[in-house]
Amino acid sequence: MDATTPIDVLLVEDDAGDELITREAFEQNKIRNRLHVAHDGQEGLDFLYRRGDFAEAPRPDLILLDLNLPKYSGRQLLEQIKNDSDLDSIPVVVLTSSSLEEDIVRSYNLHANAYVTKPVDLDQFFKAIRKIDSFFVEVVRLPPRS
């Protein structure tokens, strides 16, 4: 995949406001990647395993994961992803409001590819999303789609 090919990004986020500003960040930054949203940990699993309403879901090239999710926590979802040989190569960026050292350490111990604390300021949030996109689309090489 090259930087001109749009990728599929799965946002696993239960907060409607954070989902909205992430969508706005994609639009404002003219990010051409396709943003898909799962609203809790269970929907995240259903998307990844293409179950139920997500039977036709694409395999995401990048996952933006909130830690504090209902039904199945972001930590549990991260652990599941990184312990599944069919999913473990998908980069996961923990994008959360928590700046607790224990959350950061645990996320990296569960093999998160990056940990980003959500900026409270809207402009800073937009910049953070742009930097994540730029890094994972323009700088690094993602694994090929299976």
Image: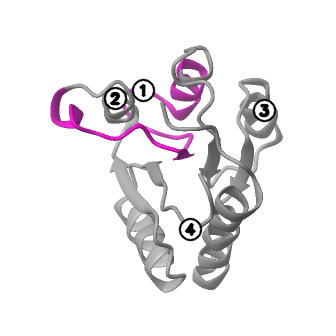
**10 Å neighbourhood of mark 2: few (<14), some, or many (≥20)?**
some
Q: Position of residue 142 (x, y in %)?
A: 65, 45
Q: Tag 3: residue type?
A: Tyr
Q: Is residue 51 left or right of residue 60?
A: left
Do tag 2 and tag 1 residues touch (Cβ < 8 Å)? yes
Residue 32: % across, % down: 46, 71
Looking at the image, tell me whether mark 2 or mark 1 is earlier in sequence order.
Answer: 2
Residue of label 2: 42
Q: CA distance from mark 3 to mark 2?
A: 22 Å
Q: Earlier in the sequence, mark 4 or mark 3?
A: 4
Along the polypeptide, which appears first: circle 3 or circle 2?
2
Q: For residue 3, which quarter of the picture? A: bottom right
Of residue 137 and residue 144, the one placed in the foreground of this image is 144
Indicate the amino acid at tag 2. Gln
Vertical order, 43 against 39 (above or below):
above
Q: Which residue is mark 1?
A: 72
The magenta span reads 52-80
Q: Position of residue 55 (x, y in %)?
A: 21, 31
Label 4 packing within 10 angstroms: few (<14), some (14-19), many (20+): few
Q: Is residue 62 above or below residue 77?
A: below
Report the coloring of the rendering. Answer: one colour
Contact (CB < 8 A) between labels 1 and 3?
no
Side (left or right) of 137 relative to 39: right
Residue 108 — which label? 3
Residue type at numbered disc 4:
Thr
Of the image marks 1 and 3, the number of the one nearer the N terminus? 1
- Circle 4 sits on which residue? 4
**Camera-side residue of 36 and 59:** 59
> Distance from label 1 to label 3 (Cα)?
19 Å
